[in-house]
Image (cartoon, rainbow, N blue to C red):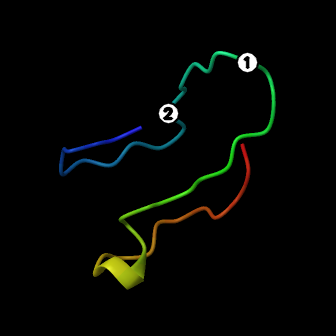
Amino acid sequence: MINFQLTGYENFRLGVPNRGIYQELLNSDQEIYGAGSKSTARAF
């Protein structure tokens, strides 16, 4: 999912094609990318 807006979303529901465990691969809101750390760093 990509959000090009300045607004962040909490508890956003995103449909997926199959049941399973999904993992965040990249989050540009992490401190290493110059943003405030908003990363959950967890599986979904």
SS for callout 1: loop
Residue 2, given in percent of the width and then of the height, sits at 33, 41
- The circle drawn on residue 12 is 2
Q: Nearer the viewer, mark 2 or mark 1?
A: 1
Tell whether 17 sits left or right of 3.
Answer: right
Q: Disc 1 designates what residue?
A: 18
Tell whether 43 sits left or right of 30.
Answer: right
Q: Give the quarter of the image for residue 22.
A: top right
Q: From this viewpoint, which residue is outermost toward the right?
A: 20
Nearest the viewer among 8 and 1 is 1
**Image point 54% across, 26% down: which residue?**
13
Characterize the local packing of mark 2: few (<14), some (14-19) or many (20 or more) Cα atoms within 10 angstroms: few
Look at the image and tell me in which quarter the C terminus lies. top right
**Image point 50% across, 33% down: which residue?**
12
- The circle drawn on residue 44 is none
- In this rendering, the answer to whether 41 lies above or below 10 is below
> For the residue marked with disc 2, what is the amino acid?
Phe
Tell whether 37 sits left or right of 20.
Answer: left
The number of numbered discs placed on residues in the rendered structure image is 2
- In this rendering, the answer to whether 27 lies above or below 14 is below
Between the C-alphas of marks 2 and 1, the distance is 18 Å
Residue 4, given in percent of the width and then of the height, sits at 20, 45
Characterize the local packing of mark 1: few (<14), some (14-19) or many (20 or more) Cα atoms within 10 angstroms: few
